Amino acid sequence: MNPARSLVIGSRGSQLALWQAEFIRGNLAALGIEARIEIIKTAGDRITDLSLAVAGAQSGAGKGLFTREIEDALLAGRIDLAVHSLKDLPTELPEGLTLAAIPARANPFDALVGRRLEDLPRGARVGTSSLRRSAQLLRQRPDLEVVNLRGNVDTRLRKLDEGQCESIVLAAAGLLRLGWSDRIAELMPPDVMCPAVGQGALAIETRQAGDGYEMCTPLDDPPTRLAVTAERALLSTLNGGCQVPVGAFAKIEDERLCLRAIVISPDGATAIAGSIEGELTRPAAAGHELGQRLLRQGAAAILDQVYAVPRDRAV
C-alpha cells in the first residue's frame, strides 16, 4: 500500500450523492488518507422521465440502474473506490469487486414530506418513483393517487412545493444528511412502510485487492454490516432489485438478529410478510431462510407478476 497516493472516489453527481462522497472523503482524511471525487453519470441519472422499473429495463442496466457505469470505472482502474447508497447496489457484485466498508447506518425509514398519511384527503396525489413505496401506500390508503415522481431530492421537493403532489415519500436518511429534517411531516415505521433493503446505509465498493480496499476497511461498522447482510441475502433469495416491491429491515436486539420483510403486489391488495430471528454469526442464513419462507407463502406469484415472466428460483 502506498499511503502517499491520493485515492479517487467515484460518485453520482446529485446533491445527495456528492454529500455522501464528501462524507467518506472526510472520514478518509481523518485517517490521513487524501482523496478526490470524480463524478460519473449513470443510466438512472440520464433517464428521468420513466419509472425506475421501466428505466432499468429499457436502459439495459437492470438492477444496476444507478451503479453500473461507476462499477465499470472501478474495474477499469479509473477510480479507486465508489460510494453508493447501499439500497441502489445490486446484491451480486461484478467479479473482482467487493464491499470494503459499510459505515454506520443513518435513519433507515421512509418519510412523508408535505402532509401526514392520516391527514391526506381522499384521492390526494402522493409522489414516488418506487414500486415498494407506492404499493405500501396503497395498502394503507387505497384511495390515494400515487404518481410517478423522479428526480433528485431537491427536484422532488420543488415539485411538491409547486403543488404537483400533496405529499411525497423520501428516505429519511437523505433528508437528514442534506439538512432538511424540518421538511419531514411523518416518519413511517416498518409496520406501515417497510424500508428498502440497505436503506440509510452507504456502501464503499472497491476492487478486491489494492490501496482502495486496504485504506477503506477501517470505515466498516460491524453491526450495520450484519443487519444489511441479512437484508441483502433475503433480496438475493427473492431475486429482486431496488425496483421491486420488497421491503426488509434488520436490527440487533439482545444479541440476536431480528429481520422482518414484506413482498407486496403493486396495487397493495396482496402482501406476504414475515419475520425471523437468527444468530449474529449467520446473518445471510437468516435472510435466505426468510426469503424462502416468503416465496413458499405466495411471494413468488407476486414477483412473477412484477417481472411478467417466471423466474428461476429454488424454494
Image: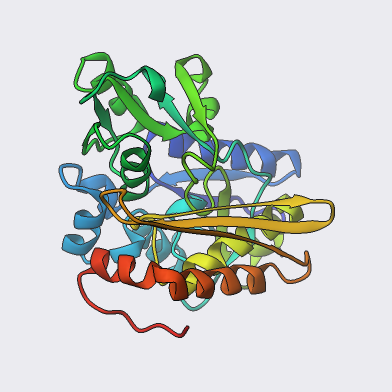
Q: Looking at the picture, does residue 154 appear above or below residue 134?
A: above
The chosen color scheme is rainbow
Q: In the current view of this chain or complex, which residue is farthest to the right?
A: 254
**Looking at the picture, does residue 166 appear above or below residue 229?**
above
Residue 224 in the image, given as x and y percentages of width and height: 69, 52
The answer, for residue 210, to whether it is visible in the render is: yes
**Residue at (64%, 71%) from the top-left corner?**
284
Q: Residue at left 48%, top 68%?
A: 294
Q: Nearer the viewer, residue 289 or 98?
A: 289
User: In this rendering, is residue 10 above or below 214?
Assistant: above
Q: Where is residue 110 in the image (x, y as percent from the top left)?
A: 47, 36
Q: Residue 286 location, x and y as percent? A: 65, 69
Determine the image quadrant of residue 244: bottom left
Compared with residue 196, is residue 60 higher up or lower down, i.e. above or below?
Answer: below
Q: Nearer the viewer, residue 274 or 283?
A: 274
Quarter of the figure that contains the N terminus: bottom right
Which quadrant would residue 270 be assigned to in this image?
bottom left
Between 42 and 282, the one lying in front of the other is 282
Q: Can residue 2 be seen in this view?
A: no
Residue 271 rendering spot, x and y as whole percentages: 40, 55
Q: Tell me where residue 228 sits by quadrant.
A: bottom right
Q: Which residue is drawn at 47% across and 20% down?
A: 184
Tell me: 122 left or right of 260. Answer: left
